[in-house]
Amino acid sequence: GAVVSQHPSRVICKSGTSVKIECRSLDFQATTMFWYRQFPKKSLMLMATSNEGSKATYEQGVEKDKFLINHASLTLSTLTVTSAHPEDSSFYICSASQAGQGVSAFFGQGTRLTVV
Amino acid sequence: AQTVTQSQPEMSVQEAETVTLSCTYDTSESDYYLFWYKQPPSRQMILVIRQEAYKQQNATENRFSVNFQKAAKSFSLKISDSQLGDAAMYFCAYRSGRGGAQKLVFGQGTRLTINP
């Protein structure tokens, strides 16, 4: 299967600072990437859909000014958690797929964010 | 909106035995895809098996097979000859068959324990 790399795998930041998470498709071009959030022992909840060269589409209830998404190239999408607070601590996972080249989504390794 | 329901929060099975994980979904679409993903303790999401709704034949991948009942909107996963490495969270997921990259809608997950 295709490879999606997410970095960093773990990050600890101070409350009020911003942190950037990268999601890269290593062996294919991803016109669309998805960002999910997973709480402990819970399922994945879609936060936003990231489209290359255009604005991200956010799910209802997700603050677009807090969770900034940039998809500037066909292999890289970034999620920036701005002015992070302890309640933003969570596991964030990205996935990527490309229309016309299979319907399966491939996932990054995830990022555990801890805000102290 | 589509929904996916996994009614078994936890399941356990003896090593080498067979276990079936349940999943039901709700949709008004006729074209869609269903998936089972495995999330081991590493939290990396791994695609286990995929089923296209237009196919009547149940998908099979080695020890993993599905029972796809389209009319009943049921999509169960059978794991044969369970192995210790099968222990993980299992998520059932739905994807629309509409063109372009589409998001996944996940069920709540089933934690599978393998007893040696």
Image (cartoon, grey):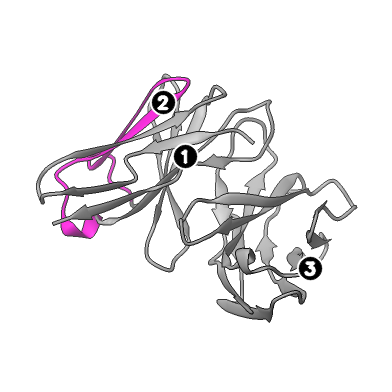
Pointer 1 chain: A
Q: Is residue A33 left or right of residue A98?
A: left
Q: Which mark is residue A6?
A: none
Residue A6 position in % (x across, y down)? 40, 38
Magenta-colored stretch includes residue B110: no
Task: Name the residue that disc number 3 marks.
Answer: B80
- Residue shown at 75%/67% (left/top)? B79
Q: Depth check: A5 or A81 in front? A: A5
Decide which of tag 2 and tag 1 comes sooner along the chain: 1
Q: Is residue A15 left or right of residue A112?
A: left
For badge 1, the amino acid type reads Phe
Q: CA distance from mark 2 to mark 1?
A: 11 Å
Q: CA distance from mark 1 to mark 3?
A: 32 Å
Q: Which mark is residue A34?
A: 1
- Residue shown at 67%/37% (left/top)? A103
Task: Report the span colored magenta.
Answer: A62-88
In front: label 2 or label 1 = 2
- Give the vertical position of A24 relative to B34 (above or below): above
Element type where label 1 sits in the image: strand
For badge 3, the amino acid type reads Ser
Q: Residues within 10 Å of mark 3 (few under 14, many from 20)?
A: some
In front: label 1 or label 3 = 3
Task: Name the residue that disc number 2 marks.
Answer: A76
Which part of the image, by quadrant, shows the C terminus of chain B? bottom right
Residue B9 position in % (x across, y down)? 55, 76
Residue A76 position in % (x across, y down)? 41, 25
- Give the vertical position of B68 relative to B45 (above or below): below
